[in-house]
Image (cartoon, rainbow, N blue to C red):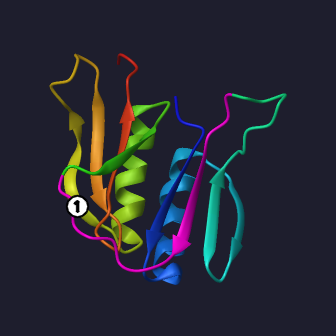
Amino acid sequence: MLDHVSITVSDIAAAERFYDAIMNALGVVKIGRRDDWLGYGERSRSAYPDRVYISIRKGAKPEDAAGRHWCFKAKWQTQVDAFWDAGLAAGGSDDGAPGLRNYHASYYAAFLRDPDGNRIEAVCHAAI
């Protein structure tokens, strides 16, 4: 459904430490950086329309919005665990430890807040 997502953070250096760590845990490549921008994933092209990309841009600290979050797919439950551990070690905060959720029988997810308070999730849908 999504082609790309862009978010803002107030401290690009703190965001880079955090997003480098969680993306590495999920096996997502970093495609670039500038002083005001970070990019992860793979940009869509005519030959690769199913690719997904996230752009992180320096801007004002985002307003708190309790229901707003984005979720990254994990291939294995161990990636969800690694996402959570890496995010905590890189300046994020706990917003829901790894575990099964009530969405379906094998919905295994973890939630973090990035250094700006954005709510981030990783989920594995695969049955154990």
Q: In this view, does 85 lie to the left or right of 79?
A: left
Q: In this view, does 44 lie to the left or right of 92?
A: right
Residue 59 falls inside the magenta stretch: yes
* Residue found 42% across the figure and 72% down from its top: 90
Rate crowding at label 1 as few (under 14), some (14 to 19) or many (20 or more) other CA atoms within 10 Å: some
Is the C terminus in the top left, top right, bottom left or bottom right quadrant?
top left
Q: Where is residue 31 in the image (x, y as percent from the top left)?
A: 73, 58
Which amino acid, by three-letter code, is at mark 1?
Answer: Asp
Residue 107 falls inside the magenta stretch: no
Q: Nearer the viewer, residue 94 or 67?
A: 67
* Residue found 50% across the figure and 64% down from its top: 19
Q: Position of residue 52 (x, y in %)?
A: 62, 40
Q: Position of residue 20 (x, y in %)?
A: 56, 64
For label 1, the residue is 94
Q: Write down the region rendered in magenta.
A: 50-66
Measured along the vertical axis of the image, is residue 125 above or below residue 28?
A: above
Q: Nearer the viewer, residue 86 or 121?
A: 121
Measured along the vertical axis of the image, is residue 45 above or below residue 116?
A: above
Q: Nearer the viewer, residue 33 or 21?
A: 33
Q: In this view, does 34 lie to the left or right of 22?
A: right
Q: What element carries label 1?
A: strand
Q: Main secondary structure of the magenta part?
A: loop
Residue farthest right in this picture: 47
How many numbered markers are drawn?
1
* Residue found 73% across the figure and 38% down from its top: 44
Measured along the vertical axis of the image, is residue 6 above or below residue 127?
A: below
Q: In which quarter of the image is residue 34?
A: bottom right
Q: Position of residue 4 (x, y in %)?
A: 58, 45
